[in-house]
């Protein structure tokens, strides 16, 4: 069953990891996908090639969501290229982990700018379109760390907690126009980044999770499909934990 047929989505930071998984799953459900990448053109081109021939429109854009002007230009370009816009998935993010005593001001500022300000930039950029058409789905990627915190990630946790507060506020502001704003908080998701960890470390993470396994990008992507589709038409202002029970 194609749950997103006829819809168009912007997915930020989709050239790898969770974002790539979301783009592929959205296409599988009949969604036209405009995705952004920061610098890895080869990865973006390979994703476009992989999804070509799927019967929907797919295009990558090199754009920095943390830049206010670039975010607005991106939305203009997508509307010009695709003709419509129904879903925004704010997925772009970075980490610069360190204990607070060793964390530089630049490490804090960069993480807040890329992870949190980008949410503001992109949501502002799509807001006019969503308001005019009186529908739209906003999906913001937070983290279990944004809910419970994590030693060595004060900057990352602050940015991801901020996303939750932002999303709930937007849900209250825009709900009367049939615009929904929700958050996904992934737990330990096995991607290219976690593949760099030793098997012993990864297994230690798995043992601490009630479902006894790490999540896959598809697990997060499926939750995004739900929040982007009409199946969740009466759900807004929520945080959906995709973490195998980590916070239970």
Image (cartoon, grey):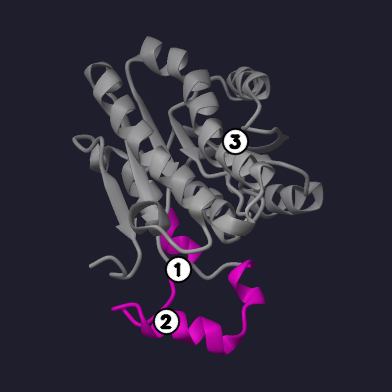
* Extreme residue toward the top, this view: 132
Q: In front: 119, or 133?
A: 119
Residue 43: percent from left, percent from top: 75, 53
- Marked residue nearer the N-terminal end (1 or 2): 1
Secondary element under disc 2, as helix, strand or loop, is: helix
* Extreme residue toward the right, this view: 42
- The reply to whether callout 1 and callout 3 are in contact (CB within 8 Å) is no
| Residue at position x 25%, y 35% in the image | 236
- Direction from residue 95 to residue 22 in the image, left or right: left
- The reply to whether callout 1 and callout 2 are in contact (CB within 8 Å) is yes
| Residue at position x 78%, y 44% in the image | 39
Secondary element under disc 3, as helix, strand or loop, is: helix
Q: Which residue is mark 3?
A: 113
Q: Which residue is mark 1?
A: 188
In front: label 2 or label 3: 3
Kindly tell me whether residue 28 is visible in this rendering. Answer: no
In magenta, the rendered stretch is 192-221
- The reply to whether callout 2 and callout 3 are in contact (CB within 8 Å) is no
């Amino acid at each position: 069953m194609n749950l997103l047929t006829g819809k168009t989505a912007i997915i930020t930071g989709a050239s790898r990891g969770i974002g790539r998984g979301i783009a592929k799953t959205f296409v599988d459900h009949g969604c036209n996908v405009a995705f952004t990448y920061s610098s890895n053109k080869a990865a973006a081109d390979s994703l476009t090639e992989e999804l070509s021939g799927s019967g929907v429109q797919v295009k990558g854009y090199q754009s920095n969501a943390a830049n206010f002007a670039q975010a607005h230009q991106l939305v203009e370009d997508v509307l010009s290229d695709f003709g419509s816009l129904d879903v925004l998935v704010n997925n772009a993010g970075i980490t610069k982990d360190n204990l607070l005593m060793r964390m530089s001001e630049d490490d804090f500022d960069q993480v807040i700018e890329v992870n949190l300000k980008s949410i503001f930039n992109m949501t502002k950029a799509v807001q006019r379109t969503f308001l005019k058409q009186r529908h739209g789905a906003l999906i913001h990627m937070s983290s279990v760390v944004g809910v419970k915190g994590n030693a060595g990630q004060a900057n990352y946790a602050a940015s991801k907690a901020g996303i939750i507060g932002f999303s709930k506020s937007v849900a209250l502001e825009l709900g009367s126009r049939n615009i929904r704003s929700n958050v996904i908080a992934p737990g330990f998701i096995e991607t290219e980044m976690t593949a760099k960890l030793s098997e012993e470390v990864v297994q230690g993470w798995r043992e601490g999770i009630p479902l006894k396994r790490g999540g896959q990008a598809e697990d997060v992507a499926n939750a995004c499909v739900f929040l982007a589709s009409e199946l969740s038409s009466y759900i807004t202002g929520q945080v959906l934990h995709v973490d195998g029970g980590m916070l239970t």
